[in-house]
Image (cartoon, rainbow, N blue to C red):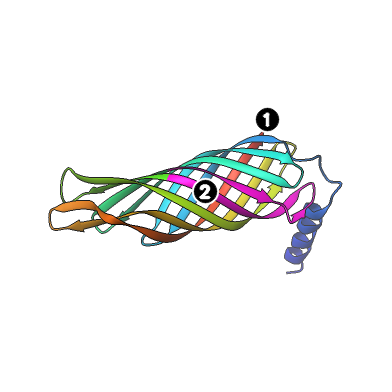
Amino acid sequence: MRTLPTLLLSLGALLLSSTASAEAPTVSLGARALLRGGDYAMAGAGGQLRLRPFQRVGVDLYADSLFGRWETVRRTDVELGGTLQYDLLHTDRFSLHPLLGACALLAFADDQDRSGTTANDIWFGVRAGVGVAVQLGDRITLQAQVQALLYLGHDFNSQRWILGADDSLSVTPMAQGVLAINYGL
């Protein structure tokens, strides 16, 4: 039973050790997995270009594709965006950072019960959150983030035999988790 606390303390000491590894790469390519919740749940994957222009500043430029269902409607979102991060806690192997970002999202809806009934829209969003990054080796970094999102766009509705987008704009809040692995170039 004493092995688990010893292991956790050793791992913590390694991550917070400032002499354990070289600086993180300044340019990385990564793969992302996402879970998003709001009016309904979505899951997806994507890729990112991670830049470190300064020691404590990170910029992630990403493209994601998410999929979800609500009743009989299948939803697909394609999102392009970026986040700016500043490391509050920073060692050679570990960083804790708040983040701010913006994106554009192409939203597609397809009603499975009404063959051929589709709708689409473009949403614009902002996000804020917190993340951690752990340097696993000279070129490999693992990232985890929790984000709150606000989107401006048209809601989709399904009535009788019609699937469409509302005429008025609305703000839609969501939350998401992101897990990414990056390879330094």
> Quarter of the image containing the N terminus?
bottom right
What are the residue bounds of the magenta stretch? 79-104
Graded by Cα atoms within 10 Å as few (under 14), some (14 to 19) or many (20 or more), the crowding at tag 2 reads some
Of the two numbered discs 2 and 1 in the rendering, the one whose residue sits closer to the viewer = 2
Graded by Cα atoms within 10 Å as few (under 14), some (14 to 19) or many (20 or more), the crowding at tag 1 reads few
Residue under the image location 68 percent in, 55 percent down:
97
91 left or right of 102 in image? right
Q: Which residue is mark 2?
A: 102
Q: Nearer the viewer, residue 179 or 121?
A: 121
The dot on residue 185 is 1
Amino acid at pointer 2: Ala
Amino acid at pointer 1: Leu
Instruction: Return the x and y of residue 76 as percentages of the image width and height.
Output: 35, 46
Query: For the residue labelled by badge 2, is the local secondary structure a helix, a strand or a loop?
Result: strand
Q: Is residue 135 visible?
A: no
Residue under the image location 72 percent in, 64 percent down:
4
